[in-house]
Image: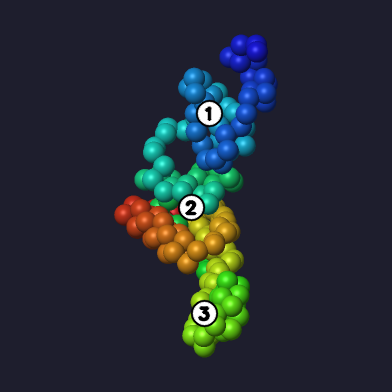
Amino acid sequence: MADITKYPHEMDMIEHPKAGGPQFSADGKWWWDGHDWLPAANAPASEPVLVTIGDIACTRTKVITPGGTRPLAGTTWSVSNNTMTTSSVSTLGVVLCIVFFLFCLLGLLFLLMKDTRTTGYVQVSVQGDGLYHAVQIPVSAPFAVGQIEQQVNYARSLAAALPTTRS
């Protein structure tokens, strides 16, 4: 492979990071902004990412989205829970009920076995001065909704700790 410091277009041959957030290449010469490889000298002053919610990342002072980086101060966060949890009689319970009904009447207790399934997504949106971004995060367990809400509350607390600038 050719020297990539001389031929940046050859960065296309390098596998792009799986995560959508900003990060540096292994050699530290290139910076992935979520869309393209850029010279590391063009990277913004790096602060550590404190929380990532879908494709939204937050540092102490900034919100990073696929659309760009904006100040965290004065942002408003919202969460919309679009999940549904259903419960039904387990297939195994029905089979065991039929088998044990023939031997004793206690087989009917197997009908109390339930399968619970959670489907849907949680939508998180952030808006501020010149910023609006929403992400839908698929959810397959009830506790995942709580985790996403905790992450958003943390981002809210980071935003609340900063002074807002009014123009």
Residue ID for mark 3: 110
Residue ID for mark 2: 53
The answer to which of marks 2 and 1 sits earlier in the sequence is: 1
Residue ID for mark 1: 31
Question: Residue 152 appears at what percent x and percent y?
Answer: 43, 59
Q: Is mark 1 on a helix, strand or loop?
A: strand
Q: Is mark 3 on a helix, strand or loop?
A: helix
Front in this rendered view, residue 156 or 108? 108
User: For the N terminus, which image quadrant?
Assistant: top right
Asked if residue 107 is positioned above or below residue 133 in the image, the reply reads below
Question: Residue 54 appears at what percent x and percent y?
Answer: 53, 52
Dot 1 amino acid type = Trp
Task: Name the residue at the bottom extreme.
Answer: 105
Q: How crowded is mark 1: few (under 14 residues within 10 Å), some or many (20 or more)?
A: many
Q: Give me the residue at 50% from left, 58% from top.
A: 126
Calculate the distance from the C-alpha at mark 2 to the C-alpha at mark 3: 41 Å
Calculate the distance from the C-alpha at mark 3 to the C-alpha at mark 1: 58 Å
